[in-house]
């Protein structure tokens, strides 16, 4: 027991015994009773009162300790220890009521903690950037996507800091100010481009949150990064524009010369020339449509690959033999250079054949008469430091070369370095795009190197069959599916 409680109990005992002791003292003084009896009564009364007071004090002390332990557990958000209450008096009932309230609060704590964990997990898993601010516009919380969008450090603490410290782009700040100043409490939406630290197209939604009655609104800002979507829209627009332009040229020629022939052409040589133009443009249009269908099927995964073990040297020789005649007509030397004892490739025979023919055809088109085109096959390590062994098929020419600025865009659809000459040579502008997709479906890599007036080398790397899982039993699953 505490010292204060002991003093109080002692005072209670003395006060309780004092009237009786005084009465016995008066009686003793008047000779009514013997002096021994008052002394015994006082001592016995004090002893019994002290025992009762001590018992009550211990009960009070235990109750105080239980209440203190319950309060400490609640403060630490821990479940309190359940002690049986002493008796059914007011203190015992109060203790039991306090324990029941503590249990209810702990249930609420657990529920809120689970909800907070769920909310935090949802925020972490969201691809959208989320920022929550209080009434004053200070950051309450933000998720990892928001840190990525605004290029914030992962360990930075931005709580209770102004929103402007997340991103200082004036367009974003203007939107935040306008949204928080709106009086109707409606969701505000906008779309704009920010520069922080790189250009990003964002679609932003701002919604008020009212946590309690008569409390001013806090705000939740959700940022959708639509940069990739904008890039896709731009690519689609460019593709439609390029496709329209590519189709217009042969269609205009077909319509124009056919109309001229229908109106009548007397000279047989002129008729023959016009028919030849119509035939060439028709073939060009057919090639364009066929390449478009092939590219579309490859991109959408509608082309099943038939994997088989191919000999690199044999695949190169078959493709070169088919292209010797056009190479001879153009006065170009077409050679092969294949290493000995190359491992097999697990690949689609027809698609790899298509890749080689496409690369050789491009090399012949842009190599002048008297030039050389070499097709090689040799062992090579994988790209980007990948040490997995593989086969590299390379087509090298001594043509005009390609400017360095144009090399990264060569695999784009309809991209041409020299548009006029490419069309004159019968190219569709889709060949390297098809090559890229076929190589990707084989888990390979494409590399283009070129120097102006020296020539171009285009290499494709494919993993060797012996390094692919399942080679002993069955081919790997078709990546296009």
Image (cartoon, grey):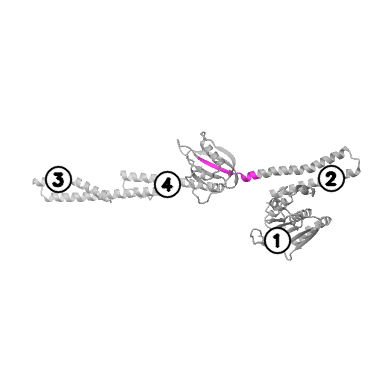
Distance of label 4 from label 3 (alpha carbons):
55 Å
Residue 396 seen:
yes
Dot in front, 2 or 1: 2
**Mark 2 — residue?**
277
What percent of the width, then of the height, locates residue 480? Answer: 68, 52
Q: CA distance from mark 4 to mark 1?
A: 65 Å
Look at the image and say whether residue 229 sits in the magenta stretch. yes
What is the distance, in whole Å, between disc 3 and disc 2 at their CAs? 141 Å
Element at label 1: strand
Residue span colored magenta: 219-231
Q: To which residue does mark 4 refer?
A: 106
Q: What residue does disc 1 label?
A: 391
From this viewpoint, which residue is outermost toward the left? 31
Residue 304 % position (x, y) = 71, 52
Q: Position of residue 472 (x, y in %)?
A: 68, 62
Upstream in sequence: badge 2 or badge 4:
4
The residue indicated by pointer 3 is 22
């Amino acid at each position: 027991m505490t010292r204060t409680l002991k003093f109080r109990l002692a005072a209670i005992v003395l006060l309780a015994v004092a009237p009786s002791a005084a009465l016995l003292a008066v009686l003793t003084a008047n000779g009514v009773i013997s002096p021994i009896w008052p002394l015994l009564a006082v001592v016995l009364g004090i002893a019994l009162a002290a025992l009762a007071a001590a018992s009550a004090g211990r009960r009070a002390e235990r109750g105080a300790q239980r209440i203190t332990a319950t309060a400490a557990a609640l403060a630490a958000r821990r479940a309190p220890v359940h002690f049986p209450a002493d008796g059914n008096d007011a203190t015992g009932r109060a203790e039991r009521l306090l324990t029941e309230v503590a249990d209810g609060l702990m249930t609420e704590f657990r529920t809120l903690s689970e909800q907070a964990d769920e909310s935090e997990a949802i925020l972490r898993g969201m691809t959208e950037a989320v920022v929550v601010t209080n009434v004053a516009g200070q950051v309450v919380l933000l998720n990892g996507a928001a840190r990525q969008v605004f290029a914030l450090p992962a360990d930075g603490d931005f709580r209770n800091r102004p929103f402007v410290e997340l991103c200082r782009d004036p367009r974003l700040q203007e939107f935040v100010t306008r949204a928080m100043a709106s009086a109707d409490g409606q969701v505000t939406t906008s779309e704009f481009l920010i520069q922080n630290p790189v250009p990003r197209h964002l679609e932003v939604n701002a919604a008020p949150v009212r946590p309690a009655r008569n409390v001013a609104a806090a705000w939740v800002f959700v940022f959708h990064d639509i940069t990739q979507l904008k890039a896709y829209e731009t690519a689609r627009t460019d593709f439609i524009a390029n496709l329209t332009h590519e189709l217009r040229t042969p269609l205009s020629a077909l319509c124009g010369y056919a109309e001229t022939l229908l109106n009548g052409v007397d000279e047989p040589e002129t008729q023959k020339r016009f028919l030849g133009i119509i035939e060439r443009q028709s073939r060009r249009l057919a090639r364009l449509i066929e390449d478009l269908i092939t590219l579309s099927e490859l991109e959408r995964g509608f082309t099943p690959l038939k994997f088989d073990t191919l000999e690199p040297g044999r695949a190169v020789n078959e493709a070169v033999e088919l292209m010797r005649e056009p190479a001879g007509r153009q006065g170009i030397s077409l050679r092969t250079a294949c290493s000995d004892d190359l491992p097999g490739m697990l690949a689609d025979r027809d698609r790899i054949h298509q890749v080689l023919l496409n690369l050789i055809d491009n090399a012949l088109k842009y190599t002048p008469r008297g030039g050389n085109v070499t097709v090689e096959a040799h062992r090579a390590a994988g790209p980007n430091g990948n040490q997995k062994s593989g086969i590299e098929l390379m087509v090298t020419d001594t043509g005009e070369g390609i400017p360095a600025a144009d090399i990264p865009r060569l695999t784009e659809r309809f991209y041409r370095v020299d548009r006029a000459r490419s069309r004159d040579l019968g190219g569709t502008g889709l060949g390297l795009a098809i090559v890229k997709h076929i190589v990707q479906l084989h888990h390979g890599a494409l590399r283009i190197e070129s120097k102006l007036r020296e020539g171009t080398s285009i290499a494709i790397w494919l993993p060797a069959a012996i390094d692919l899982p399942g080679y002993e039993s069955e081919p790997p699953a078709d990546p296009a599916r």
